[in-house]
Image (tube, rainbow, N blue to C red):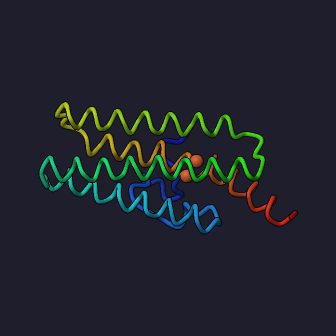
Amino acid sequence: MPTTLSPSARPILAWTDLLLVRHDAIDADHKHLFAMATRLHAGICDGQGDSLVREIFRELMTYAREHFAREEALMAAARFSEKEEHVFEHRLLTYRLNNLLYQFEGGQPNLAEELEIFLDRWLARHILTSDLQFAQCVANAASSN
Ligand SMILES: [Fe+2]
Ligand SMILES: [Fe+2]
C-alpha cells in the first residue's frame, strides 16, 4: 500500500483540489478542516504557546465531530448502503485525533509529525476513498429524485 496518495508522491499536509469529492458542502467542510489543521501545525511548529495550540486543537476536534455528523445525516437521507463502515471510520479518525490531543497534553515532542501522519495517511485517505464513494452515492440519489 502506498504511504501517500498524492500523484507527486508528496504527502498531503494542506488542502489540495485533488481532495475534491464534488459535493459543495462536503468539500467546503474538508477545506475548512485542512485550514484548521494547517493552523494547528503552524502553531505547533512555531511554538505559539500551549494555550493557543490547545484552543486550535479543540476547535478542530469540534469541527471534525460536526462534519462527521453532517456526512452521516446525508448518508442516512441517501440510504447509503455502507454507512455503518463509514461511521466506523469516523470513529477511528476521532479516536486518532483524541490520541493526538493526549500526546500534546503529555508533551510529545513529535507532535507535528504525528499530525502530518494523521492528515496524509488517515484524513486524506478517508476523503479520497470513503468520502468520494459516499458523495457519489448522494449525487446519484439526488439525480434520481
Ligand atoms: Fe467521511
Ligand atoms: Fe469527510
Count the marks.
Answer: 0
**Looking at the image, which is closer to me, 20 or 138?**
138
Whether 70 is drawn above or below 142: the answer is: above
Q: At 77% across and 41% down in the image, what residue appears?
A: 81
Quarter of the image with the C terminus is bottom right
Quadrant location of residue 38? bottom left
**Looking at the image, which is closer to me, 115 or 104?**
104
Q: At 44% across and 55% down in the image, what residue appears?
A: 12
Whether 87 is drawn above or below 144: the answer is: above
**Residue 83 position in % (x across, y down):** 69, 40
| Left or right of 140 in this view: 4 | left
| Left or right of 139 in this view: 23 | left
Quadrant location of residue 7? bottom right
**Looking at the image, which is closer to me, 98 or 118?**
98
| Left or right of 70 in this view: 113 | left
Q: At 39% across and 55% down in the image, what residue appears?
A: 13
Q: At 52% across and 66% down in the image, what residue appears?
A: 28
| Left or right of 57 in this view: 47 | left
Quarter of the image with the N terminus is top right
**Residue 52 position in % (x across, y down):** 18, 53
**Residue 46 position in % (x across, y down):** 15, 56
**Residue 98 position in % (x across, y down):** 36, 35
